[in-house]
Every structure is written in structure tokens, then in C-alpha cells.
Amino acid sequence: MTHTLIYPHTTVHNAAGHLEIGGCDVVDLAREFGTPLFIYDEQTLRDQCRAYHAAFGARTDLYEIVYASKAFSCRAMAELVAQEDLSLDVATGGALAAARAAGFPAGRIYFHGNNKSPAEIEAGLDAGIGHFVVDSFEEIERLEAAAAVRGRTQDVLVRVTPGVRPNTHDFVQTGQQDSKFGFGLADGRAHEAVGRLKDAPHLQLVGVHAHIGSQIFELDSYQREVEVLFVAIDDWRRAFGFECRIFNIGGGLGIRYISTDQPSSIAEFAEIAVTAVRAGAEKHGMPMPRLFVEPGRSIAGKAAVTAYTVGTVKVIPGVRTYVAVDGGMSDNLRPMLYDSKYEAMLANKAEEPATDVVTIAGKHCESGDVLVRDVHVAPPEPGDVLVTPSTGAYGYAMANNYNAQPRPAVVMVGGGRAHVIIERETWDDVLRLQRPLAP
């Protein structure tokens, strides 16, 4: 078998009838590293980074690809992104610390976040990051004061909520007027923010940023976003003399989680984005700004699978069969947060017909801890290695210690070799920060 639409690019069924990724037998990986286990295919990650460069580079020289690290952030991922000549966005001091530990070039770091603490602002300034994406009036004041103390001028982008609502889950829409992110266009707050930033002596406003949501399939939403932003930029040019050098339309390109999903391609995204920005600049008599996009899910999502060990198989006659695995909502919250759909297979029975319809349940004390409902798999048994694909984005990134469950290990595979990039937590790790009751 060659890879399917939802598995990493190097996926095959090997001679043993097992699932193999990056030249590594998934059953062997589960035995060696334990489960739950995130398995990232290095080749798929690099392929996706290169696909973005190829798609945008074929259409303009004025572009930059910024990896949205919230999808999956760790030192090894930051190192890979740097090697593939992408920039990096971070949204917390912890993500910045991971980037710095990886030696990521500070000038290519963009600091997001709707509530950056003073400590995070200071950490970004002291690291010499390239740009802050300013999200509130309070942040303007904090950032200006901190930059003044350091006697430096900091480049910034202003985050705008353009009032564009894409067709995606309500929880991952970010561009509508009622959003915790950015400054609204409709209520004039974005206009006021631009004025304040232009007046701030230690802040240099060089561009705009907007993000309309995540897991977007319909690309016309991006075209509407660009059109709305250019109208505003034209207004700010006349009012404040603002020249937009960076035009960041965010990320959010959707991926396949199940085989029937029909997302747009990276090339289609590039075509509509570049065409829209070029047309907007021409219409409003502006130089073409540098177009930024911030993919996260569409780079990391397909690149990983999660492997579990089946513990129990519970048949409820006439109702359903529950296949319980040794993870669940502590390593994949998306089904509980967004009713996200996944597929599944038994890695040790990859060649066997998927004849049984089952529901994959987690081990946590919540009835809603269900990873996949009504999925076809080979006849399951305790000890089987079950895999869910397309878990590379917002899987480990949202992992937690609910029910005192240690977070999984993460391995990177390629060329028949696997190495751990995030160690598995132990019960001792879960207890490490806990203290006894005061005497």
C-alpha cells in the first residue's frame, strides 16, 4: 500500500502486514517507545514546508512563510522549520523559549497573543525578535514603555479583525467582529490603534496582520479579507501616512482528517492570496507589499499519527462496540472541543479487511472521552496497536494531565530510524510540582 490522503507521505504496509512510516514499523515503535505515541514523519514535514515555498515562490518574490508554532511546538520542530527557511510565530513566552533553545534566528520570530504579559514582552525584546503583532491598546502602552527603557525601536504589526466569517467551526473563527483577537475595523478601534502606533516613538508600524480562522476549505474568505483590509490601509495611508510593507493574511488552510474531506491545495491558496493582494495594491495605487502567510495545521497535521494500545473491547449487543485505548482526551482534545472526525486502523493488522464498526474510546473518566465514532477497523483485540492519522496539529500541543495521565512521547522518523524529540512523562513528572498539605 502507498500512503493514503490522510497519512504521512512515507506510509506503506510492510511485508509483515504492519503499518510502516518513515521506514519504521509502527508496531515496533509502539513496543520500543510505549503508547500513546506521537509519530512524526520528517519527510512529510519537509515536503509541506517546501510546497509552501514552491507555491508562493512561483507567483511572487514578495512573500514570507511563517510557521504557526501553536500547531506543534518543540525544539526539534523549530530547528526543522529554520532549516527549511521558514519564519516562526510564537504566542507565549514558553513557545519563545523553545525557539530560543533551538537557536532559531530571532529576527525571523513574530510574537502573537491577545494578552502578552509584561514578562513575555520583555523576553521578546531582550531576545531581539523581529516583530510583535500588537493585539490591544494595553499592549501598545506596555510595549512602548518596555522598548523605551531599552532605548530601542521595535517593529510591529497591528492585528485587525476584518469582520470576515469563514465557513468553519465557531470555536476556530477569529476574524469576526466579536473576537477576543485584534482591533475591530467596524467600530473604528483599528483606526485608533494605527494612530496610536504611529505616534509611539519606540514602535515602528510596518504592516497589518489578520487571521480569519482555522480549518478553512473555502478560499473566497481570504479574498474578502484582503479586499476589506486594503480599504482600511488606504484610509490609514491618508490619515496617518501609513505605508504597509507587510501584509499578513494569517493561516488556517484546512487539511483532510477523513478521506472524504475536500480541502483546497497549497497551490490554490497561493494563487488566490497572491492574486488578491496584487489586485488590491493596484486598485489602491500602492506598491505591492510583502505577503505573509502563517500555516500551522497544513504543515504539521498530516505529518503525524498517534499510536495507542488497545486495552479492552466492550460489546454492547445491539448498540455498539467500544474499543478502549490507553490515551484519549489527554492527548487529543479536538473531538471533544470541536466534534472533530478522525479515522483509525490497527497497525498490526494493516492488511486485514476492516470488517468491524467500532467506537474508539479513551481511558478517562468522562463519557465524552471518545476519539472516533463508528469507524471500520479489522477485528480488534486487546494488545492491538491502533493508530489515528492526521494528529500532527493540536494533538500534542493540547495534551494535558487530566486524570493525572502523563503526556505521551513524541518521536521523529525517517530513513528507517526513529529518535525521541519529546520524552514521555512519568508518574513522577506528574507529581513533581505537587506539595504536601501544610502542617
Image (cartoon, helix red, strand yellow):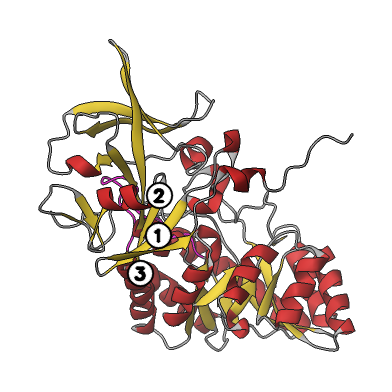
Instruction: Please identify the dominant SS of the magenta region.
Output: loop
Residue that mark 3 sits on: 48
Residue that mark 2 sits on: 37
Q: What's the residue type where badge 3 is placed?
A: Gln
Which of marks 2 and 3 precedes in the sequence? 2
Which of marks 1 and 3 precedes in the sequence? 3
* The residue stretch that appears in magenta: 251-265
Q: What's the residue type where badge 1 is placed?
A: Val
* Residue in the picture at 36% in, 41% down: 308
How far from the left and from the top, in percent, is residue 357? 24, 26
Answer whether residue 230 is visible to the viewer in this image.
no
Q: Pick out the residue farthest to the top.
A: 317
Q: Pick out the residue farthest to the left.
A: 15
**Count of picture labels:** 3
> Circle 3 — which element?
helix
Taking 61 as reference, is 239 left or right? right
Mark 1 packing: few (<14 Cα in 10 Å), some, or many (20+)? many
